[in-house]
Amino acid sequence: MRQKGSIFSDFLAELEVPHTVSASDAAFEGMNFQSLFGFSRLLNSYGIDAQAYRLSDKSSVAAVPPPYIAQLNDGFVIVTGFDNDAVTYKCREKVHTKPKEEFVDSMTGVVLLAYPGENAGEPDYGKHRFFEIASAVKLWLLIICASALAVFGFVEAGLWKNLSTIFLTLVNFAGIGVTWLLILKSLKVSSGSADKICGILKEHGCDTVLEQKASKFFGLFGWSEVGFTYFTLSTLYLFLFPQYISALALINGCCLPFTVWSIWYQRFRLHTWCTLCVITQCLLWLQFFCYLSGGFWSGVFDNIVPLIAMGAGYVAGLMALNRVMTFIEKIKK
């Protein structure tokens, strides 16, 4: 799967020049001046001859063989073709189609044509490609190993024997995924998945809610951190200590009043909705019904020592995650 890239790496892809997105984007971002001259020099370093032209008659752009870079009044785009008096072009990683006359009116008349040589390609392409593949392999290896470990823990703990614990495990994993997206939103890390989900109930609702002071527990820990710690450690406890599942049921019960407050606060105080937050509240209630239907609320106070130990684990996990997030936020500044 091709990663998202800059206009430079997108243009290289249209020219079918061997390159890696990460290295090409880094070279593009390292340009001293974001101009056609700098763009042309960067193309030259890839073995691509480039020449800029100013069209005396902008309507003659239809005769220019694509792909090429065209300068519009609001920036640069990659023209990929003309079809039935319509122009197809790429802008900000998206493909657009516009009537020819409208496109010509938005042009400055300046275009940049590129002519790849026989040996055109990214400098040190082989090395960059190797590291790109290695990084992808590392990610998939991590996913496979984590999945294998999760399946082993699920089977070893005997959770597959009870329908309630099967659903509970699925809810826990869903909670980890949703709160991870909330973590990304809190760190202002771009995530297409998070943006799509957040726009379901209210456009930019998640951002509005997460920017409030009430989005922090005691003003110190983001609720996204609390949620991610809770679902992650609940899953680990369930796999490692299934005999203490009643303690997990009690801890879940202690979380339910927060869900009522959260929904009330979003509805009557902020008058907006954080879709990811609402999903998290729903998952907490689904957990409750899983514990209830499985009969795990019986004897919840029989094992006080494990309950205290689990609580200490949640606190320790939250403190560790908070330190990591604080470190990341400082780096980003």
Image (cartoon, rainbow, N blue to C red):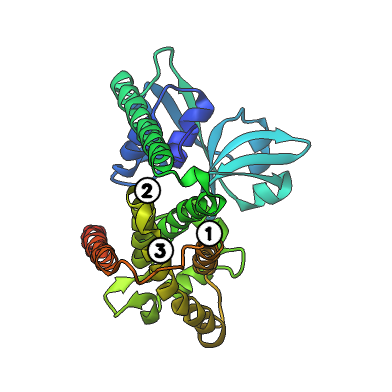
Q: Residue furthest right?
A: 84
- Circle 2 SS class: helix
x, y percent for residue 133 = 36, 25
Mark 1: which amino acid?
Answer: Gly
Tell me if label 1 and label 3 are in contact, CB under 8 Å: no
Q: Which residue is mark 2?
A: 239
Sequence-first disc among 2 and 1: 2
Residue 83 seen in the figure: yes
Q: Looking at the picture, how far across and down is residue 333, in whole percent?
A: 24, 62
For label 1, count other residues whose C-alpha is less than 10 Å away and answer few (under 14), some (14-19) or many (20+).
Answer: some
Q: Which residue is mark 1?
A: 294
Between the C-alphas of marks 2 and 3, the distance is 14 Å
Q: Nearer the viewer, mark 2 or mark 3?
A: 3
Query: Badge 2 local density, few (<14 within 10 Å), some, or many (20+)?
Result: many
Q: Which mark is residue 330?
A: none
Q: CA distance from mark 2 to mark 1?
A: 16 Å
* Residue bearing mark 3: 246
Residue type at numbered disc 2: Phe
Residue at 40%, 41% (x, y): give it. 150
> Is 37 located above or below residue 244 in the figure?
above
Marker count (numbered): 3
Q: Which amino acid type corresponds to the residue marked 3 in the rendered image? A: Ser
Q: Is residue 204 visible?
A: no
